[in-house]
Image: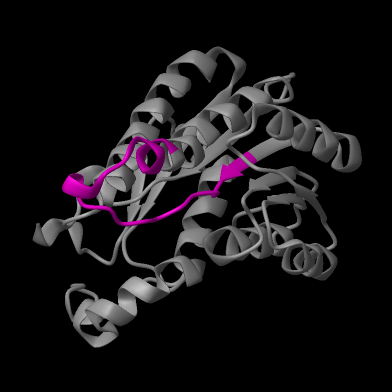
């Protein structure tokens, strides 16, 4: 049985969607949970009250805010044992309409934000008992995506390589670093795209016959945070209902 009792887990970008589902799952498994949010203060504070955790404002693209939020989480919830990096954006722009600002906005949140969160966590992880970092990437970072998603796909592929690099670098500290790669998942970030594509059509494309749910990803996350995954690092757990194997 997965047990996170007494562990402080920080969810970076935990106010909604998959991040919120993982915050709830970690708390249900006994963890002390802190979470960060960028804009939805009321939602984040309500979730923190629900699970007995704390919520801290943080734009993951801003290194000072990431450092301050991480330090604040440790000050309020104690020794850090796990970090889940969930903050991200998903926007479409075809290459002929690509602007530097659009490209850099995606990279700043999805890729630079991941690096900053790991760097901030590094100061607090590995002091005797090790720890675990879980990065939410995407199947789009493994296989690419449809027209207009280049910036998103590249940022997600970058997260996968960053996880491998950090798994090497942090292994001497007994800190494990892994990715979870969901396919289409029922979140507010994906809602508009799912409506445009048609939910029934998307569901039919999965061998298991349904669209992923945030709880599916939260389950994989809890496993990777736990001692049950103590010999797993530098890999990507794909939570996709089998869709990637269809090509």
Q: Position of residue 173 (x, y in %)?
A: 61, 16
Whether residue 52 is visible: yes
Whether residue 102 is in magenta: the answer is yes
Whether residue 210 is visible: no
Q: Quadrant of residue 131?
A: top right
Q: Residue at x 67, y 65 (%)?
A: 24
Quadrant where the N terminus is found in the figure: bottom right
Q: Position of residue 122 (x, y in %)?
A: 65, 22
Whether residue 12 is in magenta: the answer is no
Query: Nearest the camera: 154 or 163?
Result: 154
Region rendered in magenta: 83-104
Q: Residue at x 72, y 28 (%)?
A: 64
Q: Position of residue 245 (x, y in %)?
A: 14, 57
Q: Quadrant of residue 58?
A: top right
Quadrant where the C terminus is found in the figure: bottom left
Q: How is the image coloured?
A: one colour
Picture mark count: 0
Q: Residue at x 49, y 49 (%)?
A: 88
Q: Is residue 35 left or right of residue 6?
A: left
Q: Position of residue 106 (x, y in %)?
A: 42, 43
Q: Residue at x 68, y 21 (%)?
A: 126
Q: Is residue 70 left or right of residue 14?
A: right
């Amino acid at each position: 049985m997965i047990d996170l009792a007494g562990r402080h887990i920080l969810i970076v970008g935990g106010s909604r969607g998959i991040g919120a589902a993982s915050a709830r799952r970690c708390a249900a498994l006994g963890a002390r949970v802190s979470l960060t949010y960028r804009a939805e203060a009321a939602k984040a504070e309500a979730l923190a009250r629900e699970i007995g955790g704390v919520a801290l404002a943080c734009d993951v693209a801003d290194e000072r805010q990431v450092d301050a939020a991480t330090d604040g989480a440790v000050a309020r919830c104690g020794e850090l044992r796990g970090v889940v990096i969930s903050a991200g954006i998903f926007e479409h722009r075809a290459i002929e309409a690509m602007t530097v600002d659009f490209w850099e906005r995606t990279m700043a949140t999805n890729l630079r934000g991941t690096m900053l969160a790991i760097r901030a966590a590094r100061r607090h992880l590995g002091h005797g008992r090790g720890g675990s970092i879980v990065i939410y990437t995407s199947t789009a970072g493994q296989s690419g995506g449809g027209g207009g998603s280049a910036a998103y796909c590249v940022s997600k592929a970058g997260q996968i390589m960053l996880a491998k690099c950090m798994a090497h670098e942090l292994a001497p500290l007994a800190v494990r670093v892994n990715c979870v790669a969901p396919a289409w998942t029922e979140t507010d970030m994906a809602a508009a795209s799912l409506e445009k594509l048609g939910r029934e059509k998307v569901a039919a494309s999965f061998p298991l016959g349904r669209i992923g749910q945030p709880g599916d990803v939260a389950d994989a996350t809890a496993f990777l945070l736990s001692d049950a995954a103590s010999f797993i690092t530098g890999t990507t757990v794909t939570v996709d209902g089998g869709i990637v194997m269809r090509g």
